[in-house]
Amino acid sequence: MQTFVRVVESGSFSAVAREARSTQSAVSKQVAALERELGAKLLSRTTRSLALTEAGARYFEEARRLVSEIAEAEAELRQGEQQLRGWLRVAASVGYGRLKLLPLIKSFLDVHPNVKIDLRLNDGFVDLVEEGIDLAVRIGELADSSLLARRIGTTQRVLLASRKYLDALPQGVKLPCVPQDLLEHNCLVYSELATQNAWTFTAGPGAAAPEGSQVTIRAEGNFQTNSSEVIRASVLSGMGIGYSPIWLFEDEIASGALQVLLPDWPAPPLPIHLVSPSQRRDSAKVRSFALHLSSLA
């Protein structure tokens, strides 16, 4: 029943096979065995797609409820034993996962040695239900209201460039003093940002503008990418100016390898949320891991 529910949620036998570390044939045989047991065809399968039959649609809703109730009962039992065990699938962006999440995962596993974590790093949009993700870290405003969300903090974005880039500026091109000066510079655009090349800044106390006023410019340059790690590498190599979360460059800023630009014009902070599908609301592992991240974030 659990296999059938996950096949419907993910829309794929192969995706469920990857989750279970099994084969597509084995997953298909489980669903076929369930259909024989029930005496009803649940899925209509072709080489390119699968769809619920009328009987399958009725059965799926009850099956999903029962699977959720079983998971809740098991979670309560394990909480009573104070033991968490099994796989927990976690998703995050590449940079955040490497720099911020990995140390927290290690400390969580030290406390819960029977838990196994499958960390999926991707800078693009990930459908949590389709991919079987239990919990994800999302930076920025949330668009999907169907997910359970807990805000655990904010991240500050900074404008920055390497000494190599600044030392090579053509004669007559000055360091940016106001956001509009960026139009004379090569800006490196992170295309997974919701606003893409629309960079917004807020006037601080030292800015030559009314405090709190905002300016948005359309950053232009000769390079863009959907990878936060590639943005990091391109900024460090001196290709141009980046507009990124500060945690992506903390060590380089502290060492002086990178210079923060327009300090009197900070970018609006981005919220950080933990999100999970509603089906995972009763998972003891999800609750414990979310609490661990919330207390240390």
Image (cartoon, rainbow, N blue to C red):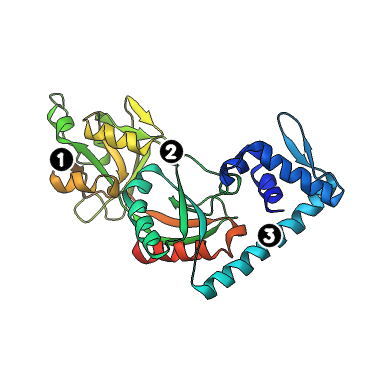
Labelled disc at residue 62: none
**Decide: marks 3, 1 in contact (CB < 8 A)?**
no
Picture layout, residue 99 above or below residue 151: above
**Decide: marks 2, 1 in contact (CB < 8 A)?**
no
Give the residue displayed 53% in from the left and 72% down from the top: 79
As rendered, which of 163 and 80 lies closer to the eye?
Answer: 80
- The image quadrant of residue 193 is top left
Instruction: Please indicate whether residue 102 sits to the left or right of residue 204 in the image.
Output: right
Picture layout, residue 279 above or below residue 170: below
Say few, some or many: other residues with alpha carbon within 10 Å of mark 3 (under 14 / 14 to 19 / 20 or more): some
Labelled disc at residue 192: 2
Distance between the alpha carbons at the discs numbered 2 and 1:
25 Å
Say few, some or many: other residues with alpha carbon within 10 Å of mark 1 (under 14 / 14 to 19 / 20 or more): some
Using the rendered image of the protein, determine whether residue 267 is visible from the camera's viewpoint: yes
x and y percentages locating residue 116 in the rendered image: 46, 54
Q: Which residue is mark 3?
A: 67
SS at badge 2: loop
SS at badge 3: helix
Distance between the alpha carbons at the discs numbered 3 and 1:
53 Å
- Camera-near label (3 vs 1) is 3
Give the residue displayed 48% in from the left and 62% down from the top: 150
Q: Which residue is mark 1?
A: 257
